[in-house]
Amino acid sequence: AGPLLASMMLAPAKPVPSVEIAPSVLMPMLSFGITMQHSLFLALGGRGLDTAFDYGDKYQAELGRAVATSGLPRSAVFVTTKVPCCASSFVKDDVYSNHCHARRSPEETAADVAHDLSVLGMPFVDLLLMHWPCDSTADTVATWRVLERLALDGRARAIGVSNFNASAIESLLPHVKVRPAVNQCGFSVAGHSGIRYRNQTWGRDDATLAACRRHNITLMAYSPLGSAAPGGVPRVLSDTNVRAVAAAHNRTAAAVALRWLVQQGVPVVTQSDKKEHMVDDLEGVFSFELTDSEMARLAAIR
């Protein structure tokens, strides 16, 4: 193991459960997102890491170094990255829009993936996602064709989408040769009722979850503890119902909010710079179960 990992290695946590998202492709039910603390997460027993072209080279390079110095075989770590679909109202006037403004063709997606792999220092990723749908179905389909080709070339073990609502999924599926394995969307307690951002839900609704289940696509939740970002729900951890359920199980509000998702088969992407939060995510979430009435109580929060 690398010196950093060796210096902080703890007793291994119980392995995080996984879900099969494609034939022989198992994804952890909990991954760790945008942060500079991926080495610590791996040392604590985490095995799923999530990044994106639009997070910037700094974060992707840190993730790559964390895997390379972990002492773990590459097959033991599940790496997800995402590349943009341009042009899209999802990034209009946003900090991530500059790259898309300069784009000329969906075919340039292949160059974005090559850049990601170079910065990560990896020949492939386990899951490659289209970060959001393009404004036109034609551009979305053309971008998806590139992802299909890259998967066939061994650049990704599985491919999927992100921020696709039910209608975007239904528009894409008639044109695919490879079904998306995953749809990663903002989804949380109180954050699944169709809150709109730039006149779209971007998959933050129960209709999207139902569409994914209908088509055997794994819905994966980012911002599973809520978010103060536009379209997010900032109050999850302070909600009285969440806190009451947490007290009943002697767990944190965060563990309860995450448990509500994973117990219904929705993997999550979390992020934190604090060791105690990582330990709670890795160990607290998978060591108890919510009752049917508690699941319904949490689902009813708006």
Image (cartoon, grey):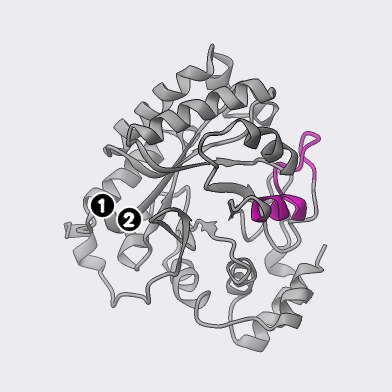
Span highlighted in magenta in the image: 196-213
Q: Which residue is mark 1?
A: 74
Q: Indicate left or right for 272 with 89 as reference.
A: left
Residue at coordinates 71% horizontally, 74% vertically from top-left?
242
Q: x, y percentage for residue 281?
A: 49, 69
Task: Write the residue at 79% across / 48% down.
Answer: 195
For the residues bearing labels 2 and 1, Cβ distance under 8 angstroms: yes
Give the numbered dot on residue 296: none
Dot 1: element: helix
Image coordinates for residue 184, horizontal then vertical, percent: 58, 48
Q: Confirm whether residue 8 shows in the render.
A: yes
**Left or right: residue 69 compared with residue 149:** left
Label 2, label 1: how many angstroms apart (C-alpha)? 6 Å
Task: Look at the image and say whether residue 201 sits in the magenta stretch.
Answer: yes
The amino acid pointed to by label 1 is Arg
Q: Is residue 12 left or right of residue 29?
A: left
Mark 1 crowdedness (10 Å alpha carbons): few <14, some 14-19, many ≥20: few
Rendering coords of residue 121 (x, y %):
26, 37
Total numbered badges shown on the rendered structure: 2
Q: Which residue is mark 2?
A: 77
Secondary element at tag 2? loop
Q: Nearer the viewer, residue 233 or 24?
A: 24
Q: Residue at x 27, y 46 (%)?
A: 65
Was residue 263 drawn as part of the magenta stretch in this picture?
no
* Residue type at numbered disc 2: Val
> Which residue shows up at 56% across the image and 40% down it?
161
Question: Does 8 sit above or below residue 143?
Answer: below
Residue nearer the viewer, 231 or 182: 182
The residue nearer to you, when weighing 273 against 42, is 42
Quarter that holds the N terminus? bottom left
Where's the C terminus, which quadrant?
bottom right
Q: Residues within 10 Å of mark 2 (few under 14, many from 20)?
A: some
